[in-house]
Image: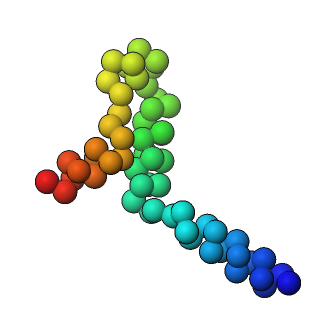
Amino acid sequence: MRYLFAILATLALTACADPERNLYEGIKSGNEAKRSPNERAMTPAPAYDDYKKERQQ
């Protein structure tokens, strides 16, 4: 039973994993924490999809 739970948990975690997106979001949130509210309002960070499109060009 314990193995079944471990396998199901592993499958659930890997099903929603996109390492590139997770890395980008982590860096983005770290940078956002360092900025003031006024800076965040004036120049919001691009979304991952926009970043990915720009990177592929």
Residue depicted at x 39% and y 59%: 20
Residue depicted at x 70% and y 71%: 9
- The residue at the far top in this view is 38
How many marks the image carries: the answer is 0
Residue depicted at x 39% and y 19%: 41
Residue 38 rendering spot, x and y as whole percentages: 41, 14
**Relative depth, front residue between 21 and 15:** 15
16 horizontally vs 20: left or right: right
* Snapshot colouring: rainbow
Res 8 quadrant in image: bottom right
Q: Is residue 14 above or below residue 48?
A: below
Residue 49 rendering spot, x and y as whole percentages: 32, 48
Residue depicted at x 20% and y 48%: 54
Residue 51 rendering spot, x and y as whole percentages: 28, 46
22 horizontally vs 15: left or right: left
Residue 42 rendering spot, x and y as whole percentages: 33, 18
- The residue at the far right in this view is 1
Quadrant where the C terminus sits is bottom left
- The residue at the far left in this view is 57
Quadrant where the N terminus sits is bottom right
Q: Is residue 6 above or below residue 31?
A: below
Q: Is residue 17 above or below residue 10?
A: above
19 horizontally vs 9: left or right: left
